[in-house]
Image (spheres, rainbow, N blue to C red):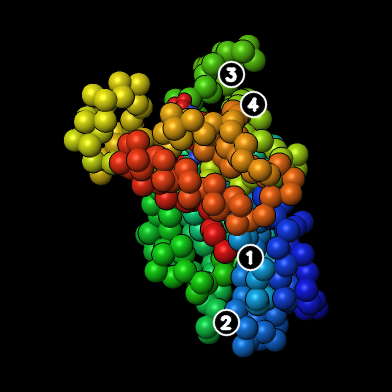
Amino acid sequence: MTIQKNISLKPYNTFGLDANTSHFCQVNSLLELKQALIESENIPHLIIGGGSNLLLTKDYEGLVILNKIKGIQIEKETDDHVYVKAYSGENWHELVQYCVNKNWGGIENLSLIPGTVGAAPMQNIGAYGVETENVFDHLEALNLETLEIEKFDKGACEFGYRESIFKRKLKGQYFIYSVTFCLTKRHQLHLEYGDIKTVLNEHQIKLEEATILDVSNAVISIRQSKLPDPKVLGNSGSFFKNPTIAKNTFETLKSQFPDIKGFEQAHGIKVPAGWLIEQCGWKGKRVGETGSHAQQALVLVNYGNAKGNEVYQLALAIIQSVKEKFGIVLEPEVNII
Ligand code: EPU
């Protein structure tokens, strides 16, 4: 483990933004991570995995620690379930593929999400009707103060929509080291969301015969048709969260905008931010080196040479126009540095 100075973070964030960090290191084990933390005791640090949820608006003064701690193992097995432990630096989609190939079910709807295993519980990643919390058993995290490993079960993680305790109360205090998922041997498929059934049909797969591999393949083709590949066009997936608004506010908006979509939640109605942004005329619009993606307005992209601040200014302009038209304040999903 060596700490390097003045390194470009361009290869380490999926937006492809060219910001520098004053100090940088890669860690391959818990021991190396502890060494890095001890050696950099007096400067701030930022731990990154796949860099897929990051908007770098300026250079970073501190130590960026790139997590490459890897490994996948079975922790426990019953007749119906397998408990799979993955270390946090594993690539998320590679874990999904590994599990699908072993015929372990539960995360197939989360195929092709960029990023690492450590980010999955951090922001309770979700797609096509499944969220991390649905398959989560427990995790191990390093307390950055005491350098001791602590165990968190599901309740302790306080999961919410794209939220966990690690993004709120315990922000910056823990490093997620490993995550254990409870996966199925007898599967219950989640086919209700969006176009999954349509795509299975197109692939000529009967719904009652669909396997977790078929679902994974369907999700991959939906994502590829809507979401830009970060290797081709820099982006960090959905830039904003879908807002949840009060039921009466939704009813009022519905009378003004009959096409508005809403999904009933425990505490209100979730409205697709992509639709709101599209209605404000941003979809497919390019502003300098950045813009809103033509197939999915919720995704902001870097056409090649965008500066983080340029993307941030676009995000602010979008927030402003959605607020003016609908009275709803969008909240970014990405971590803005
Ligand atoms: N919509 C529009 N215009 C757009 C985009 C979407 O009208 O430009 C409408 C669609 O017609 C649809 C609704 O919005 O009725 C929902 O769209 P979609 O299924 O594409 O999902 P989303 O709500 O925009 C969320 C997640 C995605 C996840 C998909 C699929 C958030 C912030 N985003 O997007 O997650 O892949 O559902 O489950 O919750 C991510 O977090 O980075 C991400 C990509």
Give the number of the mark in front: 2 or 1: 1
Mark 3 or mark 4: whose residue is earlier in sequence: 3
Q: Which residue is mark 1?
A: 58
Q: Quadrant of residue 48?
A: bottom right
Query: For the residues marked 2 and 1, what is the alpha-carbon distance in whole angstroms?
Result: 29 Å
Disc 3 within 8 angstroms of ligand 1 (CB): no
Rendered residue at 52%/62% (across/down): 139
Q: As drawn, is 265 to the left or to the right of 125? A: left
Q: Is residue 27 visible?
A: no
Give the number of the mark in front: 1 or 4: 1
Amino acid carrying mark 2 in the image: Leu
- Between 205 and 54, which is closer to the camera in this rendering? 54
- Between 123 and 98, which is closer to the camera in this rendering? 123
Q: How many marks?
A: 4
Mark 3 or mark 1: whose residue is earlier in sequence: 1
Q: Please tell me whether residue 263 is drawn above or below residue 148 in the rendered image.
A: above
Instruction: Specify few, some or many for label 1: CA neighbours under 10 Å numbering under 14, 14-19, or 20 or more.
Output: some
Q: Please tell me whether residue 99 is drawn above or below residue 264 in the rendered image.
A: below
Query: For the residues marked 3 and 1, what is the alpha-carbon distance in whole angstroms?
Result: 41 Å
Q: Which residue is mark 2?
A: 147
* Quadrant location of the C terminus in the rendered image: bottom right
Rendered residue at 58%/18% (across/down): 199
Give the number of the mark in front: 3 or 4: 4
Q: As drawn, is 16 to the left or to the right of 324? A: right
In the rendered image, residue 238, in percent from the top left (x then y), is placed at 53, 42
Q: Which residue is mark 4?
A: 225
Amino acid carrying mark 4 in the image: Ser
- Asked if the residue under mark 1 is in contact with the one under mark 2, i.e. CB atoms within 8 Å, the reply is no
